[in-house]
Image: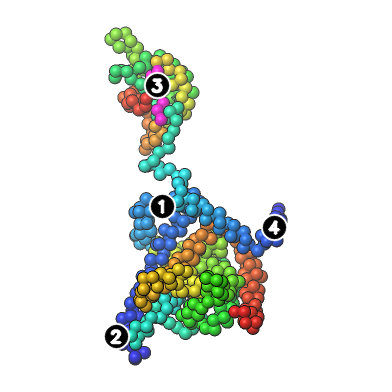
């Protein structure tokens, strides 16, 4: 369909419109040349996310022992079913996870595990650079690195 | 020329070398200016990783171009395929030879002109050589043996021929006013004062006596150099990369270089014909008096003014490119034949009438 736009008399000479356009680009050019651009220089600068950001998981530890008691609430609540725990018993009869694995490729970072945990054990840190070259399953040892301060 | 001494030859060769070196720097510098400039206009930063402000990016690009594989596709006409980039680059280099960067300098019994050749047909020479550049593009399109390349080169030649007409007619006004085709004479004549408004003297620059002519010339220059908004020879969505579709590596870089060198020549022409060429920028003559410099300093200041003007027009090319959307092909032809051509004819009559009335 041919849409005819009404052009004003002066617009048809192009010139005024071209000058207006040039003024706009000049404005942006000067603003960015002397002012601050909105671009974040990524590897050197990083965006500041809020503390509630849900990134890479970790299991909180107290005195070097994980808080988790393998209560199985988080694998139950997890909508992606990506947490796999094998429970065991310590000599002092306390339950603990022998194996704690998160298949992070299935995880949707909903944060339900964090909310469900009665022991304040599983947490989501603010780390968002998680790209890797192969499929990863976070093991217990890896998850025990303390990555955040939640 | 039997009368040329060894010194004359040395001066001539020196001027050739300097001019060529300047021209060779144009493409990398402009590539950088274009990227950073466009980025800033679009609220981005552009390449800023390599070297201070990303200045070494162009160097890296050059190295990349040189080390890329440079195959000649099997379906092309190899001879013309290889020849085409050269045919578009060499005229671009040749045209700048007659544009003066400073007034002739008297040193003893010797007059040194600041251009490679002070031809008395300077302007005609430029038009003659510049129109050779289109052969490179046609050759590239034809030798590539590819429908997109051919369409691109056809468009390009069509556009160039159409706009060369109005370009040629638009400078007729300048020739009438300054009664010369020698670029040095034209630039010298622009040193006169056109109007004295109190303390401000408006010089007799081409722009002030030929505003319409400048407008036409400027627009035609954009079309001649295939720059946006008239970059019809290439078109991602219609004809891919146009005439240089089959080119890669350094051969492609040569086409790009030709484009920038053409821009440089067009800017030089605009500065020489319409903005006083090497005539000093406002304030510079006071500066010359203040430091009490001699003829040598004067020549340096003139060269500085000339290159400042050229730099402005180079920047103008970039500025316009990132401001305006491109024309459709039929709009381009409409503008060329139905608007620019009549206007340039009108300009000639207007100039004649004004000269008859002794206004200019
Ligand atoms: S963040 Fe959500 S999907 Fe990921 S492990 Fe926790 S509950 Fe499962
Ligand atoms: S909910 Fe907390 S305590 Fe329970 S298994 Fe998960 S991490 Fe361990």
Residue B276 vs residue A147, the one in the foreground: B276
Q: Residue at x 43, y 43 (%)?
A: A40
Residue B22 appears in the figure: yes
Q: Report which residue position mark 4 lands on.
A: A7
Q: CA distance from mark 4 to mark 2?
A: 65 Å
Which stretch did the figure color magenta? A120-126
Q: Residue at x 40, y 62 (%)?
A: B29
Q: CA distance from mark 3 to mark 1?
A: 42 Å
Instruction: Tell me the colour scheme of the image.
Output: rainbow
Q: Is residue B139 above or below residue B355?
A: above
Task: Report the disc number at residue B151.
Answer: none
Label 2 lies in what chain?
Answer: B
**Are the residues tagged 1 and 4 within 8 Å (C-beta)?**
no
Task: Report the disc number at residue B47.
Answer: 1
Is residue B48 shown left or right of residue B41? Answer: left
Q: Report which residue position mark 2 lands on.
A: B6
Residue B171 vs residue B144, the one in the foreground: B171
Q: Secondary structure at mark 1?
A: loop
Label 3 lies in what chain?
Answer: A
Badge 2: how crowded within 10 Å, few (<14), some, or many (20+)?
few
Label 2 within 8 A of ligand 1 by Cβ: no
Q: Which is more N-terminal, label 4 or label 3? A: 4
Q: Is residue B269 above or below residue B231?
A: below
Q: Secondary structure at mark 4?
A: loop
Q: Which is more N-terminal, label 1 or label 2? A: 2
Q: Quadrant of residue A118?
A: top left
At which x and y percent is residue B91?
A: 45, 74
The image quadrant where one finds the N terminus of chain B is: bottom left
Label 3 within 8 A of ligand 2 by Cβ: yes
Q: From the viewer's perspective, is the residue at label 2 or at label 3 nearer?
A: 2
Label 4 lies in what chain?
Answer: A
């Amino acid at each position: 369909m041919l849409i005819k736009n009404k052009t004003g008399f002066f617009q048809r000479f192009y010139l005024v419109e071209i000058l207006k356009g040039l003024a706009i680009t000049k404005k942006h050019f000067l603003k960015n040349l002397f002012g601050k651009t909105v671009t974040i220089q990524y590897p050197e600068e990083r965006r500041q996310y809020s503390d509630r950001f849900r990134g890479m998981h970790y299991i909180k530890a107290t005195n070097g022992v994980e808080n988790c008691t393998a209560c199985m609430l988080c694998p139950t609540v997890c909508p992606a079913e990506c947490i796999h725990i094998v429970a065991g018993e310590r000599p002092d009869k306390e339950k603990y996870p022998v194996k704690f694995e998160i298949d992070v490729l299935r995880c949707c970072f909903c944060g339900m595990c964090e909310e469900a945990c009665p022991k304040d054990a599983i947490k989501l840190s603010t780390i968002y650079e998680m790209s890797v070259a192969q499929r990863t399953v976070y093991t217990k040892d890896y998850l025990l690195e303390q990555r955040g301060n939640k | 020329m039997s009368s040329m001494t060894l010194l004359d030859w040395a001066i001539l060769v020196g001027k050739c070398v300097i001019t060529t070196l300047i021209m060779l720097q144009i493409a990398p510098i402009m590539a950088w200016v274009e990227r950073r400039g466009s980025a800033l206009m679009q609220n981005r930063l552009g390449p800023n990783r390599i070297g201070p402000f990303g200045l070494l990016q162009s160097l890296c690009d050059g190295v990349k171009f040189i080390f890329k594989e440079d195959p000649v596709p099997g379906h092309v006409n190899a001879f013309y395929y290889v020849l085409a980039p050269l045919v578009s680059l060499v005229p671009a280099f040749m045209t700048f030879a007659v544009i003066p960067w400073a007034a002739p300098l008297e040193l003893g019994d010797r007059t040194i002109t600041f251009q490679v050749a002070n031809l008395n047909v300077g302007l005609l020479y430029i038009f003659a050589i510049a129109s050779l550049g289109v052969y490179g593009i046609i050759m590239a399109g034809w030798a590539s043996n590819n429908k997109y390349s051919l369409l691109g080169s056809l468009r390009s030649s069509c556009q160039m021929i159409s706009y060369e007409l109005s370009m040629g007619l638009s400078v007729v006004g300048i020739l009438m006013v300054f009664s010369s085709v020698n670029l040095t004479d034209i630039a010298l004549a622009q040193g006169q004062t056109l109007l004295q408004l109190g303390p401000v003297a408006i010089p007799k620059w081409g722009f002030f006596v030929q505003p319409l002519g400048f407008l036409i010339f400027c627009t035609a220059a954009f079309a001649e150099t295939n720059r946006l908004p008239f970059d019809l020879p290439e078109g991602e969505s219609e004809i891919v990369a146009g005439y240089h579709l089959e080119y890669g590596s350094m051969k492609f870089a040569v086409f790009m270089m030709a484009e920038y060198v053409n821009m440089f020549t067009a800017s030089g022409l605009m500065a020489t014909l319409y903005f006083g060429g090497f005539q000093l920028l406002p304030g510079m003559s006071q500066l010359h008096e203040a430091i009490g410099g001699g003829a040598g300093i004067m020549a340096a200041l003139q060269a500085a003014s000339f290159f400042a003007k050229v730099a402005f027009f180079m920047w103008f090319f970039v500025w316009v490119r990132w401001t305006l959307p491109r024309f459709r092909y039929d709009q381009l032809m409409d503008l060329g034949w139905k608007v620019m051509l009549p206007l340039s004819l009108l300009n000639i009559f207007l100039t004649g009438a004004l000269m008859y009335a002794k206004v200019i």
